[in-house]
Amino acid sequence: MVGGHGYLNGNSADGGAGIPGGGAGEDGAGLPEGGVYDWFRRGVLLLEQRHPAAAVQLLARAAEAEPGSRSIREALARAQYDAGSYAEALENFRTVAQADPTDDYAQFGWGVAAARLGDFEASAKHLSLAVAMSPENAHYRAALRQTRATLAARAGAYGPLLPGAPGYVAPPQDPEQGV
């Protein structure tokens, strides 16, 4: 972890199955025990233990209770990303980045989530911002290189894609030639 942030790893987990006490300890209204800060801390702990789906549950409750908390939203976005909910993660990273455009980690998260959703132009924009703010961060630089390479490949910088390659689209058939 660098600068207080865990790096997005894309690992999905079992959604909390096998977690001691998973689901237990809720009050009659379906709310977890404790207050918002307790939910946040337990959610971050679950995320660190690689249980992102379970973390999403607690962190979403915390975000509902404290919608203006950038810390909660960032942790929720990390959990959503790691659980494979890229669109939801992007929205939460965007919310944090729009509240504080100088938050390099929120820009990074926005960029990698956009890449997972196939929006490499937006990915390059936000990863470039993250790298500009923290040029020493190797994770940011690697993600930006990957996104730029994808954009270059799609633009044909490395020659035409061959049939069977990821992203290959067959040329349209001419109906007059009967092919």
Image (cartoon, rainbow, N blue to C red):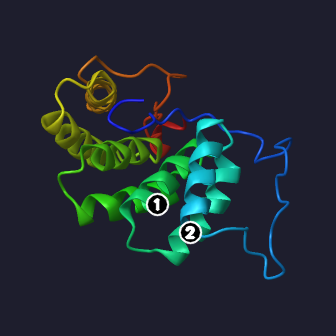
Say what secondary structure mark 2 lies in.
helix
> Looking at the image, is mark 1 or mark 2 nearer the viewer?
2
* Image side of residue 120 versus residue 75, left or right: left
Residue 12: image x %, image y %? 66, 38
User: Image quarter for residue 127?
Assistant: top left
Say what secondary structure mark 1 lies in.
helix
Residue 96: image x %, image y %? 33, 60
For disc 1, the marked residue is 72
Up the image or down, 13 lies above or below 142; here it is below
Residue 34: image x %, image y %? 67, 68
For disc 2, the marked residue is 36
Confirm whether residue 176 shows in the render: yes
Give the residue at x 39% y 67%. 69
Give the residue at x 67% y 61%. 57
- Marks 1,2: beta carbons within 8 A: yes
* Image side of residue 133 versus residue 55, left or right: left
Nearer the observer, 104 or 146: 104
